[in-house]
Image (cartoon, rainbow, N blue to C red):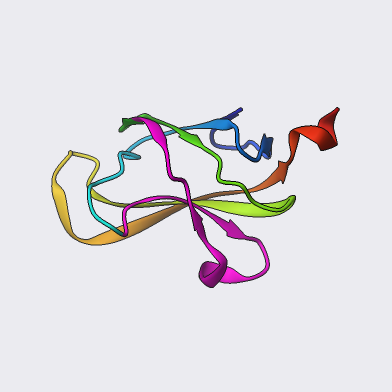
């Protein structure tokens, strides 16, 4: 599933998802990454995607972590600016809400 501006898609747990946009590249570091954050629960319930397949400024392809079905925000945490320079502190870019389902629910 591809996520871009204006979309409200369904994505699947333990499956690939793509985010498109600008200045999306995830930097290096423990906190940098792509997270699913429950719509109700805030950043304390965030789960990090363990696998990022594509890490480009215009697109991210990642494995959706195994999460319970529900509505989530996708949060990209990065310390890389739009020009590719390292930032002093990380910024967060949010997408969503998105609905996460298991493959069994869609069958």
**Residue 51 magenta-highlighted:** yes
Q: Is residue 63 left or right of residue 28?
A: right
Q: Position of residue 87 (x, y in %)?
A: 17, 55
Camera-side residue: 31 or 88?
31
Camera-side residue: 43 or 58?
43
Camera-side residue: 61 or 89?
61
Q: Is residue 90 left or right of residue 18?
A: left
Which residue is drawn at the image coordinates 36% and 29% (left, top)? 58
Q: Is residue 30 left or right of residue 42?
A: left
Which residue is drawn at the image coordinates 52% and 72% (left, top)? 44
**Residue 24 magenta-highlighted:** no
Q: How many marks?
A: 0
Judge whether 69 appears above or below 60 on screen: below
Quarter of the figure that contains the C terminus: top right
Q: Position of residue 59 (x, y in %)?
A: 40, 29
Which residue is drawn at the image coordinates 70% and 44% (left, top)? 100
Q: Is residue 90 left or right of residue 76?
A: left
Quarter of the figure that contains the N terminus: top right
Q: Position of residue 67 (x, y in %)?
A: 64, 51
Give the magenta-colored segment's residue range: 31-54
Which residue is drawn at the image coordinates 31% and 39% (left, top)? 23
Q: Quadrant of residue 24?
A: top left
Judge whether 20 appears above or below 99 on screen: above
């Amino acid at each position: 599933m591809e996520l871009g501006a204006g979309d409200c898609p369904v994505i699947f747990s333990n499956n690939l998802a793509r985010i498109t946009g600008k200045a999306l590249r995830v930097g290096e570091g423990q906190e940098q990454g792509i997270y699913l954050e429950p719509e109700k629960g805030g950043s304390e319930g965030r789960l990090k995607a363990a696998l990022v397949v594509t890490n480009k400024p215009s697109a991210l392809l990642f494995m959706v972590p195994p999460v319970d079905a529900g509505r989530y925000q996708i949060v990209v945490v990065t310390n890389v600016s739009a020009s590719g320079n390292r930032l002093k502190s990380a910024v967060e870019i949010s997408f969503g809400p998105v609905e996460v389902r298991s493959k069994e629910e869609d069958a």
